[in-house]
Image (cartoon, coloured by chain):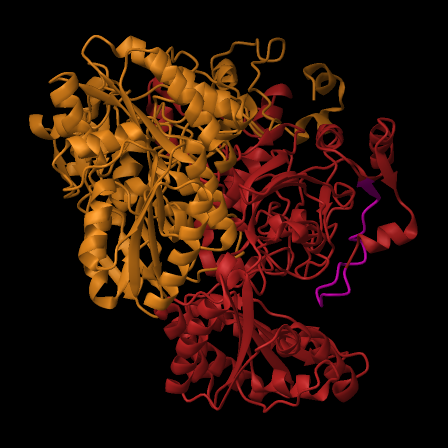
Chain colours: A red, B orange
């Protein structure tokens, strides 16, 4: 509705849609200015379903010097607070990523709540004084998720690390969000159960929820969005909500569970989760297949899915990655430098798994496979899959020894529809070969998600970034996403905009502002919330 | 933050969090009243993350008599509009449900857009004039989802019924939202593919998205939330958004896809969907197992899942339901009136399926099974499963002939964790046996979701409703949900509140008001949006 039309409506009609006025208008009223009507800011009458960045006033936060006195109120409640140098450093950046915080992006305090109630008390106070809050989980983020772009406090969930309930017959568990997924697996093992998502070893449930993490086994078990039944969340104003009850299936209102999964801590702090778990496969084997061309491998993956085989994992390693593996000491094998697929296939017994292997072998040979090996014992299985498991370390070894002792690795996270994977990987290979950089490609092929990772030396960051940008644009133009599993953080905001368009981002921003009107929760992540934000990304 | 504290802050600090003022305050300003500061309505400073119903002014809509001239503007754009009596009747209520619209709950016009762009043009106009909009899909809703509680227009999606793309290698399809899922299956069959969700035969994708529908095959393929990759949605103000790109896995920002799935048309109109599809199992059989006690059957289901078997369907029919089946002519078999499980088990070949059947048989005999039959041919499979498929019709036959020619059936939709299923069904049975009503119980046992359906005669509605209310409360008190698959509509709002609590509902309301500030989209569904709404539910 245009502004003009509103003004010419009847008074009663006029009022109907006006559910909110901005800061500006309130100040105008309170302090006697009179310019609101004649020159309305675009957010004055938010009849729109979305919020444009330009319609927002800049957020205003608690002055830096007042934060200590605010945090003192939290400490007085008996909640653990620290600001020692090592703690501050640990919560400022990460060794895993090339995307480093700016010198001023340092938190003032780290808060360690131990219960949902403590998180609620903490957020009530921080919201009241408008202190920026960065949630912190395993600290393995690659995209600047926990950078303190507005220096305030970090809330670290790692002390909320209890497995609360195991429901063997329901195949679910209730956990505090600071539980590490590998530790959860240790607890589940005696029950013959396992967690479906297997991201980096240090990942905690809270961060895995935040980025909708996945990993190797997502081919079968899906990402976190497929593995969480319900969440307990503390909203920015301290309100505690539970998104759902415990049944696996529900049509009870909005799917708030999945709204929080992948929201990167911008909408609240997840304190508990009810997660699905799975029976550990009664029998499992690993098959490794090598192909002359990338296309042969992706055709294989498509045909495997159409055959009805459901591998637990389908991992692609390109020739360069196989070279790194042969170079390293992480596996005893020396591999041909060819495109390679690693399959993990589990089932209810050996007969069933072998039937799968038979069909798999036939598909791969139709697709020109040069090598097909599968494990016939647990030892062989471990040995074969160790190549995939140690890929990251092998890559680091190779880079350090063969490229530069201070080598960096830029990890990308593009996903495309499977049918476009070989074409996109081919074009990316050409892009890289034209440059002076060495690279490896690792893909969760079952999901069309690949990490094309570039080695670069000190001083080469700008050039490598240019190539990465081209790679991402190539992915997006092939119906792809800039992030298959790592999230957006503050390093991929511009690409998210390219991928989804302004209107979709503006809808996300509308939801963000509704739930977090003070914009305190993990500011500047996923999309901009401040019109004066001049961040390149 | 308390009001007092705001008043004693400095002016600049005061302004920071004030991102919205309400209707009331605007009127006060514009028309010279001065009571805002001394007596602020609770929504004046929405620093909260949630919206309480009591904080809202009542919505105001376009006067009834002005709606025809608004709709004329839509018709002038070449968009199909009708208000014939049969069309109005078809879009007013449903034969499927006992929950009927009130006499005044009748739409004025039915609009049939054929493209996303037409939906956008339509909503822009309706939003401008604040005309209530009820989205209409297959019309099979049981919970009053398409009741015109505020008489306005219905937007019927059924003319947007094209299958736009089939990506065989990606196992996905792009469809307009008015596609019927069975017709989609007909299109997919030549490719050896199928859609995962199988609700009632008339269901269209738009409505299935709206209620997060599922059905018999959800045991393996999940509900709609597990089967949609991306949605194209027209927001209430006419903005067109696409929630995601086409890769199956993505961590690209908020999961807007799942925000719209299950939102029952309260946040916008879904016009296109990218859906996952699956290979039709290469071999499939059906097993029917009868048990002396309900508990034996639920123990079986839990052990089947723990064994790693993934049945396509696990359906439970109680003794009463088996009686109706034997009574009807829908199957040739006469069945013992015992708790019965129907398993559909598919796989990559006959060997694999038979291995599953072997393990299944051993589990059932450990759980006191009295009968175990499985199909060895396609004909036997169809014949066995036809019992489950025709259950609803058999039940109607029985009721009509044996209870009353104008018998009604009240269909409930509770889901509980599997481990609580037999206990809850036992208690519900006791509840029903104490009454004079006959009943049947059908359960999607793999999901803990059951339909305990009561037959009642004209004049008995009040009594049967009382029993249903007790059943639902029993479900909720056992960690259950009031809706496993049919949604909330306007018939279960009070139970949703009981299930999830005020704060969770208030968060849903906050999101609703952010996206649909005029409250035009499917008003009064899922939760109340009008403080003067005195609806019992």
Horizontally, residue A352 falls left or right of residue A277, namely left
- What residue is shown at x 20% (from left), y 34% (from top)? B325
Q: Is residue A98 magenta?
A: yes
Q: Can you say whether A362 is above or below B522 in the image?
A: below
Outermost residue toward the right?
A84
Horizontal and vertical percent position of residue B414: 40, 29
Quadrant showing the N terminus of chain B:
top right
Residue A156 seen in the current view: yes
Overall secondary structure of the magenta section: loop
Horizontally, residue B389 falls left or right of residue A353, namely left
Residue A194 figure quarter: bottom right
- Depth check: give the residue in front, B313 or A521: B313
- What residue is shown at x 23% (from left), y 53% (from top)? B381
Q: Which residues are magenta?
A: A94-111
Horizontal and vertical percent position of residue B19: 58, 30
Horizontally, residue B303 falls left or right of residue A240, namely left
- Depth check: give the residue in front, B11 or A232: A232
């Amino acid at each position: 509705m245009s502004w003009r039309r509103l003004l010419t409506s009847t008074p009663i009609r006029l009022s109907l849609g006006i559910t909110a006025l901005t800061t500006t208008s309130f100040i105008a009223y309170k302090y006697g200015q009179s310019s609101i009507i004649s020159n309305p800011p675009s957010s004055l009458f938010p009849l729109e379903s979305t919020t444009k960045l330009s319609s927002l006033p800049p957020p205003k936060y608690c002055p830096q010097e007042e934060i200590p006195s605010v945090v003192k109120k939290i400490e007085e409640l008996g909640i653990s607070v620290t600001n020692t140098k090592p703690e501050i450093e640990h919560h400022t950046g990460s060794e895993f990523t090339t995307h480093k915080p700016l010198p001023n992006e340092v938190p003032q305090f780290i808060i360690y709540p131990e219960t949902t109630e403590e998180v609620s008390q903490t957020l009530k106070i921080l919201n009241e004084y408008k202190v920026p809050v960065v949630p912190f989980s395993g600290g393995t983020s690659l995209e600047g998720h926990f950078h303190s772009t507005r220096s305030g406090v970090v809330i670290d969930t790692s002390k909320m690390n209890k497995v609360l309930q195991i429901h063997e017959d329901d195949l679910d568990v209730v956990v505090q969000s600071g539980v590490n997924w590998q530790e959860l697996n240790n607890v589940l093992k005696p029950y013959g159960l396992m967690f479906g998502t297997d991201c980096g070893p240090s990942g905690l449930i809270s961060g895995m929820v935040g980025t909708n993490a996945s990993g190797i086994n997502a081919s079968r078990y899906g990402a976190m969005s497929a593995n969480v039944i319900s969440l307990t969340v503390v909203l920015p104003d301290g309100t505690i909500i539970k998104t759902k009850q415990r049944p696996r299936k529900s049509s009870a209102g909005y799917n708030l569970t999945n709204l929080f999964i992948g929201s990167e801590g911008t909408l609240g702090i997840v304190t508990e989760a009810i997660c699905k778990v799975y029976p550990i496969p009664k029998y499992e084997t690993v098959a490794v297949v090598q192909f002359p061309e990338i296309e042969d491998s992706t055709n294989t993956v498509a045909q495997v899915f159409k055959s009805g085989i459901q591998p637990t994992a389908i991992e692609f390693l390109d020739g360069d990655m196989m070279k790194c593996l042969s170079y390293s000491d992480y596996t005893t094998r020396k591999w041909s430098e060819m495109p390679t697929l690693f399959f993990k296939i589990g089932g209810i017994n050996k007969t069933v798994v072998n039937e799968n292997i038979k069909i798999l072998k036939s598909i791969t040979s139709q697709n020109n496979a040069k090598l097909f090996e599968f494990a016939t014992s647990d030892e062989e299985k471990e040995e074969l899959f160790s190549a995939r498991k140690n890929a990251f370390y092998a890559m680091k070894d190779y880079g350090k020894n063969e490229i530069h002792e201070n080598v960096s690795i830029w990890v990308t996270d593009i996903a495309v529809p499977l049918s476009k994977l070989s074409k996109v990987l081919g074009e990316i290979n050409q892009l890289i070969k034209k440059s002076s950089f060495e690279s490896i490609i690792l893909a969760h092929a079952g999901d069309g998600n690949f990490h094309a990772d570039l080695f670069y030396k000190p001083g080469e960051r700008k050039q490598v970034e240019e190539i990465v940008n081209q790679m991402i644009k190539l992915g997006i133009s092939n119906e792809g996403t800039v992030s298959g599993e790592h999230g957006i953080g503050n390093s991929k905001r511009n690409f998210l905009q390219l991928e989804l368009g302004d209107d979709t981002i503006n809808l996300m921003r509308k939801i963000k502002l509704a739930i977090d009107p003070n914009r305190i929760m993990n500011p500047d992540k996923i999309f901009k919330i401040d019109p004066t934000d001049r961040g390149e990304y």
